[in-house]
Amino acid sequence: MIDLSRHYENVMPIGQGGMSTVFLATDAKLGRKVALKVLNNAHTHGQTLLEEARLLAKLNHPNIVQIYNVQEVDTSLVLEMEYVQGTTLYNHLKEQHLDLEKKLSILIDIAQGLSAAHKQHILHLDLKAANILVNEQGQAKIADFGISQLKGEQDVSQLSSFGSLVSMSPEQLREEPLDQRSDLFSFGLLAYQILTGNHPYRAQAQANTEQAIAEQIKFSPLKHAARGLIEYSDDLITLIERLLQFDKDLRPHSADEVVMHLKQVLMSINYDNSDPTIELSELNLSNPNSKRNKLLALFAFAFLFVGLIGSGIWYWQITKPKTYIAALPIKYDEQSSLTDTQQRIVKLGLDDAISNFILQDSSTLQVSNSEVETAIKLMGEETSLASLGKALGANILLEPELSCRGSICEVILNAIDGSKATMIKSTRYSVDAESFSEAYRNSLSHVSGLFSQEALSDEISDAFFEKYVTLVNSYNSGNQDLKQILHQVRTQQRQAPNFTPLYSLYRRVVIETHRMHSDPNILWSFVDTLENAPESYKFSPNFLLDHILVYQELRDWEKAESLITSLEKTNIDRYELLSIKANYFRERAHYQQALDNILAAYKLRPTLQVTRSVAIIYLLKGQYTDALSYLDLVISSAPNDYWALQAYADISLLSGSPYQAIAAYKRLLKKSPQDTKALSNLAIALSLVGEFQLSSIHAKKAYELNPQHLNYILNYADSLLLLKEEKQSKVLYQTILNMTEDSTDFDDLIPRVQALLHLGEGIAALKLVNYIENENPNVYDLKFVKAMVLTLLGEHQSALLTIENSINDGWSANFYTLPWFKSLCVHTEKLELLISTKNTNYLCAS
């Protein structure tokens, strides 16, 4: 048995795995607590293990568990590591309920750790919740980083035995060569589970076993990547879909890119207490565990659908156009000094009052608070009310202004015309920020008065309201056990079933508790509770929303089609129906049907949210020109929408609009000066318009920020060569050859081809092109690179034919104006047919 006492004190075992044992100890020299990982059977690979462990020790990043020292003790390899006071992410997710902000922060931490390791050419290969530690401050740190590789760098066939089957990428399960995109797929699996509580492949696996799930990952693309992400933004859904692409070429190129997108999502999330914008899953109102199952099923559908086409009392049956109301965030004057707790009480009271009034009023619909918050963040705090009203498609904006002295606040609530930004009506009242009861009741009374209606009276006690506020705060803080919160919510609901704001909280607690404990009875109990809701609530969209989100958890997708078919025959608000259908079809990857419905919704209400959805679906369909049109609309109204601006820039570059791309990349870099992808792409765009000096400046910045990225090295080398800096460019081209010498990854081989070509090894470059073409003819930029090789080798006819094929495949003709293709100017007539007269004149001008 290994003796650690010579170097460490207070040694005690704290964990054991298949290839290691972990001890907690105190470093005898420094007096600090450390974790010691003793690798079993380390002698099997001797020096290789020791060298690779020392490489891991060079990883020094706040989101990676630091390895302090590596040594051999009694023929065993001992890794002395940072001791993280906290727990594993697996336990953290079980013990705490996390809001979206906290989940995104954890994911950003993990992605940042991956980025740091990937820049050192280190993969994790076993990324899962059990291998992530969360310290007492909530910071995530990746543990066991690269330990799976310590089996030996070249022993690829053995790698899968060290990873968890359901955490691996398809290529890892197939024992193929791996790169950083394998870790990104695993990160996508982990992100999906953090966000939803479920494994994305579980629904399509033949059985709920690791082997069955792994078999699906290994051989089958994920059929419904967005399933389970119903509550999240389009940006976040799109990122997860990209991470989980079966084809690694379609995944993000780097962890840096993932970090950037996650930070943009974090920037635009809402922190309010409102309902999410819904996307359809399915609806089945029956509870198989209830004694009245069959009766309930018949009653529920009869109630839902016969009621919709029957007497006219259903909320959606009223045929006159609905008035859309958007509640703006509270504005406090400079003298107000409420505590955070008091502000939460006032906000909760006002939000609940507005939502409850709209719930009772069949002529109005509410723009969700999340959509309002997101629009303001993307458009900027200083955006005009008229612009905001247009972006939200809101007929009326409710603008609350508060002036507080102590805990007493004077409230001015303005009803503003959403299109003209003119005052319609205003009301003034006071509230005590210490009393939710007063904030809620007074606000409900005055909101109703704004619309010339009387507020419905209630007999709810102040004590009830105090417990309700405590519950909301406990839920939002994440400090109390979810089952305890659920029990208290149920108790309150039984005490006051007519207090409708409680149902939204109830639903969120139910869904999160089910995700944590996987108990379907929790969901069925909520369904039964809904049957006892007041009639006003049953006649509201919220009643349907509750069922949609609950049954989405139960994964019965057949009912979705049935529900959509039935809703078509009702008087549901047309825009709401089209939005539901568009989201449903997008989730099922039926993009043409999704597009048809979202375009129809756009014609009715061209909101910012719908415009972004149209752009995303066009992108998913590969219709980039159409996507550009809608991205342009998004950017014009929401200048802070980083995702839209980046997509606009990338598509402009690829579709042959370099000046458009340059302007967009410059705007991106004002917001994020160290965005390496934007820097590198800007360099490419500048080279397309002959700005070689500026191109080199930006290519150099990207290279210096990430000197291990092959494409950044290549772009910088190319920019230097175009400036006749041949000596320095050759050094960089040689670096590419050294880095890719043993690689079989096509993404590595494409830069290698170009490095060979520019170093004068044209025949070797052509042979490598032919190899890639035989092995994987669908590599994205293969034809462009082949045309370059053939041109510089003097094979002009073959080069022209390759250019024609590449343009037919969608490659922009602008890329063939680069100086590499200047020798083709002897074929002016053919060039004009292929890349246009304008581009030919530009290429051949000097």
Image: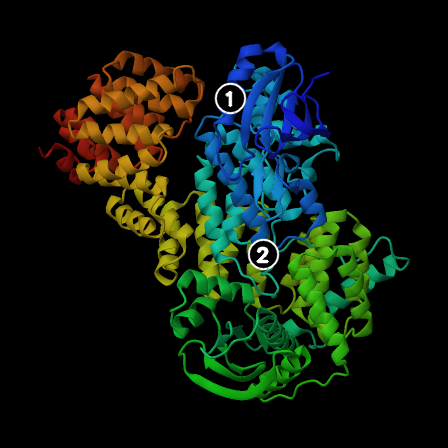
State the scheme by which the image is colored.
rainbow
| Numbered circles on residues, count | 2
Q: In front here: 495 or 747? A: 495
Quadrant of the rendered structure where residue 418 is? Answer: bottom left
Q: Is residue 82 left or right of residue 418?
A: right
Q: Is residue 368 left or right of residue 356?
A: left
Q: How far across and how far down the image is residue 253, in percent?
A: 44, 35
Q: In front here: 93 or 249? A: 93
Q: Regarding mark 2 in the picture, which secondary structure is present there? A: helix
Quarter of the picture containing the N terminus is: top right
Residue 528's place in the image compared with 740, above or below, is: below
Q: How far across and how far down the image is residue 516, in percent?
A: 73, 48
Which amino acid does the dot numbered 2 rest on?
A: Lys
Regarding residue 595, the answer to whether it shows in the image is no
Residue occupying the point 62% across, 64% down: 275
Residue 197's place in the image compared with 183, above or below, is: below
- Of the numbered discs in the image, which one, if any, rests on residue 54? 1
Quarter of the picture containing the C terminus is: top left
Residue 411's place in the image compared with 630, above or below, is: below
Residue occupying the point 63% across, 12% down: 75
Q: Is residue 766 left or right of residue 6?
A: left
Which amino acid does the dot numbered 1 rest on?
A: Arg
Q: How far across and how far down the image is residue 297, in percent?
A: 82, 59
Q: Regarding mark 1 in the picture, which secondary structure is present there? A: helix
- Of the numbered discs in the image, which one, if any, rests on residue 203? none
Tell me which label, 1 or 2, sits earlier in the chain.
Answer: 1
Residue 174's place in the image compared with 712, above or below, is: above
Q: How far across and how far down the image is residue 47, in percent?
A: 54, 11
Residue occupying the point 84% across, 53% down: 288
Label 2, on which residue? 581
Residue occupying the point 28% across, 23% down: 732
